Amino acid sequence: VASKMIHLDQEMAGGFYAVHKDRPFFNDLVDYMTSGPVMVQVLEGDNAISLNRELMGATNPDDADEGTIRKDFATSIEQNIVHGSDGPDTAREEINFFFG
């Protein structure tokens, strides 16, 4: 439905991941997310969230199934290469964050 490549700055990455601000990995996550361009997309379709999460694979790439994005491309749990909304409410918030 929508797609764009952007480069997150510290403020934008920190705002997007604000839910994690008190966790020990927050600063490393923000640094990673601002280290290069990211592709943000809005996907639509039957079971889009669950199918996308299946394609992404487990958060820890060591636990991800063969052929998933994280198994094939992630370097660690901290740099797991892809993010996806976990439900419709989160998806609405995240879509609004990036696409207004």
Image (tube, helix red, strand yellow):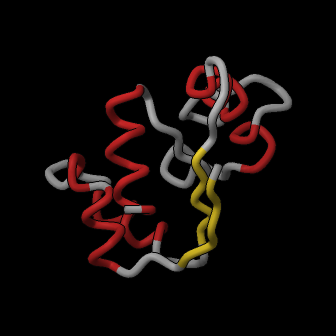
In the rendered image, which quarter contains the C terminus? bottom left
Place of residue 44 in the rendered image (x, y in percent of width and height, measured from the top left):
63, 35
Residue 31 in view = yes
Residue under the point 60% across and 48% down? 82
The answer to whether residue 29 is above or below residue 44 is below
Residue 53 appears left or right of 26:
right
Dividing the picture into quadrants, the one containing residue 58 is: top right
Place of residue 9 in the rendered image (x, y in percent of width and height, measured from the top left):
38, 81
Residue under the point 83% across and 27% down? 66
Is 31 or 62 nearer to us in this picture? 31
Residue 81 in view = no
The answer to whether residue 52 is above or below residue 4 is above
Residue 14 appears left or right of 75:
left
Place of residue 49 in the rendered image (x, y in percent of width and height, measured from the top left):
56, 27
Residue under the point 25% across and 64% down? 15
Is 10 or 42 nearer to us in this picture? 42
Name of the residue lying farthest toward the right: 67
Is 88 or 54 nearer to us in this picture? 88
Residue under the point 28% across and 57% down? 26
